[in-house]
Image (cartoon, rainbow, N blue to C red):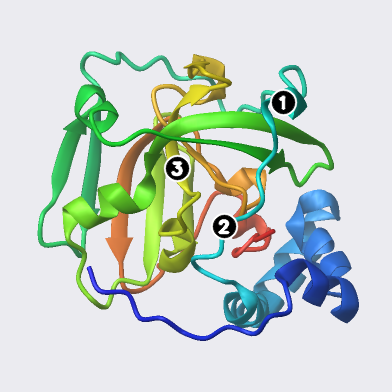
Amino acid sequence: MNLIRINRPQLSRRDFLKFSGFSSMSFLLGGCGAPIFEDVVGKLSEPLNQQLETFIFNAQKPVPEFSAREIQPEALLINSFRYTPIIDQEKYRLIIDGEVNNPLSLSLAEIQSLPLTSMIIRHVCVEGWAAIVQWGGVRLREIVALAQPYKNVRYVYFQSGDGYYSSWDIASALHPQTLLAYQKNGEPLPVENGAPLRLASPIKLGYKQSKWVTKITLVSQLSLFKGYWEDKGYEWFAGL
């Protein structure tokens, strides 16, 4: 898949938000304010958020990682959407479809046969807590490349075994530190943390990092339904 390189400004997203005041606005849109406020203001300002954050996001720049001694094993809290699904890993299939030349149905063994990438990053929840975690898995862009997406693909939808759903911009999905993780802190990923597969990335807030991922759909346009929390007014881009 051919990627178009765009020269980005040197000011980091964190610095830009800090100086411009968008950090506090993003926090309000992120899910800690009143639901009615989130629903109205979030939908009105989403195009602005998306344009600004996409402009200052460097799609290939790695985020600094942490050392093994900084891992916080007990800090990663368990948040459930509706329930914790129990997925038979022997029968599990990851479906990749949408605007692609090569739709896929991959077993967990096939996914684990791809190159393993491990990273120690900070997981940041919109509720105000964070945890340094080591994730291991396959880069999402390896899976996307196998599916051979059409050139006009701009977004990626994720569906989960518990009914949760979310969508990302394609550049964030292809970031080198965006993983489909099946390990946590060097051990097999626990069910409560999203086994058999979950998203893990240092560039998105926690509610974008879907657990129990069962289906990935690549599209050129977003539908009216962008994500479970996003449809309730939470910021769509939700970058860090």
Above or below 83: residue 42: below
Circle number at residue 62: 2
Estimate the spatial distance between the alpha carbons at disc 2 and disc 1, rounded to whole Å.
19 Å
Question: Of the residues tagged 2 and 3, which is closer to the observer?
Answer: 2
Estimate the spatial distance between the alpha carbons at disc 2 and disc 3, rounded to whole Å.
13 Å
Circle number at residue 71: 1
Q: Position of residue 183 (x, y in %)?
A: 47, 23
Please, what is the three-letter code of the amino acid marked with disc 2?
Pro
Circle number at residue 112: none
Name the N-terminal-most of marks 2 and 3: 2
Above or below 8: residue 75: above
Q: Position of residue 133 (x, y in %)?
A: 65, 30
Which of the 4 image quarters holds residue 138? top left
Question: Of the residues tagged 1 and 3, which is closer to the observer?
Answer: 1
Estimate the spatial distance between the alpha carbons at disc 1 and disc 3, rounded to whole Å.
18 Å
Left/right of residue 68 with respect to residue 169 in the rendered view: right
Q: Which residue is mark 3?
A: 179
Above or below 232: residue 93: above
Name the N-terminal-most of marks 2 and 1: 2
Which of the 4 image quarters holds residue 196? top left
Please, what is the three-letter code of the amino acid marked with disc 3?
Leu
Does the residue at mark 2 contact the one at mark 1 (Cβ under 8 Å)?
no
Rate crowding at label 1 as few (under 14), some (14 to 19) or many (20 or more) other CA atoms within 10 Å.
some
Does the residue at mark 1 contact the one at mark 3 (Cβ under 8 Å)?
no
Q: Secondary structure at mark 2?
A: loop
Please, what is the three-letter code of the amino acid marked with disc 1?
Ile
Above or below 120: residue 195: above
Residue at 83% across / 61% down in the picture? 28
